[in-house]
Structures are given as C-alpha cells and as structure tokens.
Amino acid sequence: MVAAVEGLEAVTVHVRDIHKARKFYGDVLGLKELQFDGTAGRAVFAIPGSSTTLRMHVYDPEEGGREPGTVSGVVFSHHDPAVACAEIARRGGTITDAPHTIHPPGFTATLSVIADPDGNEFVLRSPPTPVK
C-alpha cells in the first residue's frame, strides 16, 4: 500500500497582526525566525528538535481556512512545563491553562496551554512518563 502522507512539513497559523505574532513567537517563546516578509505579512519559525516549521501569515477571508484565534491541538514539548510557563509569563505571554499533571492509562505527563496574541492555543507538555 502506498503511504498517503510521508511527513509533516509545517503548521500554519493565521494571525491578524504579523508584528505582534513575530514578537510572541520570537521574543516570548524564543523560536528562531527563519523568514519574514512584512509586505506579505508572513513569517516562518523553526521548532526546536524538529524539521517541521511554524508558519504564520495575516489571514485573508478569501483564502478560507481557520480564522485567527481558532487554532488548537498543536502540542509543543518541554521537560518542565511549569518552568517554561513561568518564563513565558515573565516575557509577557498568556497562560490559558496552568501546568497540571494528567494521569491517562499507562502514563503521566504535565501539561499547560498557552495562547498567542490572537488567541491561538498551544499545549505545552512534558514527555510522558510510563506508569508501571
């Protein structure tokens, strides 16, 4: 059987203000900016430990897709989300769900939720620890 998907190249987030987005993703989250086009309202950031990039551009209703502030379900990792959230908050970021530990069957993990200036939300999760 032929694979329909062979990888994940990028995650795209629609934003209202590319300059506020650049400040959040670069200064608050500390992601490395790879490209920026102010005229087109586009930016690309590297995601540490991954070849996948985080891309963003100013939303145009003509293009379709999700409006700014409606992204959720993207999960970033950090070995200690509580420490990461404290730093994000210190840098002016928004924590929408404080770090807490979850106990689904077979593992535990600590997670929190952060939001960009448009309200797009991202989970910040520790690596899962198997439960014996």
Image (tube, grey):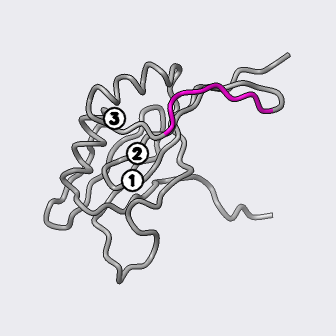
Please tell me whether residue 46 is drawn above or below residue 102 in the rendered image: below
Q: Amino acid at mark 3?
A: Leu
Disc 3, SS: loop
Task: Farthest residue to the bottom: give it.
Answer: 62
- Residue 74 percent coordinates (x, y): 53, 48
Labels 2 and 3: the sequence-earlier one: 3
Q: What residue appears at the point 46 percent right and 49 percent down from the top-left corner?
A: 121
**Callout 2 crowding tier (Cα within 10 Å): few <14, some 14–19, many ≥20:** some
Q: CA distance from mark 1 to mark 3?
A: 15 Å
- Nearer the viewer's eye, disc 2 or disc 3? 2
- Quarter of the view holding residue 101: top right
Q: Residue at x 36, y 63 (%)?
A: 14
- Identify the element where label 2 is drawn: strand
Q: Secondary structure at mark 1?
A: loop
- Image point (58%, 26%), residue name: 126
In the figure, is residue 131 to the left or right of 20?
Answer: right
User: Closer to us: mark 1 or mark 3?
Assistant: 1
Kind of residue at disc 2: Ala
- Quarter containing the N terminus: bottom right
Magenta span main SS: strand
Disc 1: which residue: 119
Instruction: Give the Cα separation between the discs numbered 2 and 3.
Output: 11 Å
Instruction: Look at the picture and state if 41 lies above or below 60.
Output: above
What residue would you read off at disc 3?
29
Instruction: Mark 1: give few (<14), some (14-19) or many (20+) Cα within 10 Å.
Output: some
Q: Which residues are magenta?
A: 97-104
User: Does the residue at mark 2 contact the one at mark 1 (Cβ under 8 Å)?
Assistant: yes
Name the residue at 25% across, 60% down.
42
| Depth order, front residue of 122/56 | 122
Q: The residue under label 1 is which amino acid type? A: Gly
